Amino acid sequence: MRIHPNNKRIKRNETILAVIDLQERLIPAMHGGRELVELSARLIRGCRILGTPVLATQQYTRGLGATVGAIAAALTESLPADKDGAGAVSAAAFTPIEKTRFSAMGEPEFVRGLKASGKKSVLVCGVEAHVCVLQTVLDLLAEGFDAFFVSDLISSRKRGDAEAAFRRMAAAGAVETTYESALFELLEGAKESGFRQISGLVK
């Protein structure tokens, strides 16, 4: 039976997170940029707690700067266990994937990382919605991946551009979600490891 795109689930063992171009010289120009960074850091920490791999890109770093500090910290810092001693996450190295093409799928290193993960579903957040995020999502779909776009963690300089991108991605078969919904969908239940940590992140 063919599953309608909007009925697809975000499953922990099938999903990788792609963080697109959350960079120092881009974020200040984005609509709601400060909140975008804060909530994206929560999603990244949540994915690390749940064992969901993360790939992060930087568009033309020389011109647009490095990944913002709060995001780099979320990608690398150690995360404590819950009060029962479960779910601790060790500190990790962070090597951004440099790109100049707008679609991350146009960067061989990103494609290699995606394929090496063995995941078939890609959760996407970042900027700008109508340029790099849109083109990445369209190319993911074209290559047979399930794409989920986290609409409260995706922005553009103009809100209208972001909204148009959301409509186009959905029409192409990508599924819209929010960061909190995605985390609890990955988690699946209140008795799963990481529940207390995820609940604490979203408060």
Image: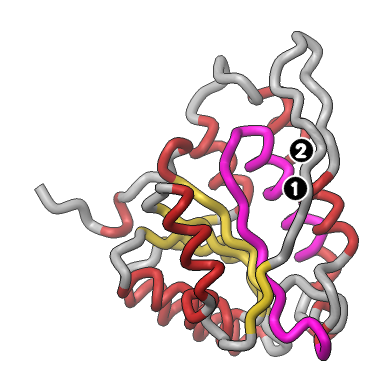
Task: Tell me the amino acid under the disc marked 2.
Answer: Leu
Was residue 40 drawn as part of the magenta stretch in this picture? yes
- Answer above or below: position of 62 versus 32: below
Was residue 196 drawn as part of the magenta stretch in this picture? no
Local secondary structure at mark 2: helix
**Residue bearing the label numbered 2:** 201
Closer to the chain start, of discs 2 and 1, is 1
Question: What residue occupies the far left of the structure in this picture?
Answer: 1
Q: Is residue 11 visible?
A: yes
Whether residue 44 sits left or right of residue 173 in the image: it is right
Q: Are marks 2 and 1 in contact (CB under 8 Å)?
A: yes
Whether residue 137 sits left or right of residue 27 in the image: it is left
Whether residue 24 sits left or right of residue 101 in the image: it is right
Looking at the rendering, the stretch of residues picked out in magenta corresponds to 36-63
- Answer above or below: position of 154 versus 77: below
**Residue bearing the label numbered 1:** 42
State the mark number for residue 173.
Answer: none
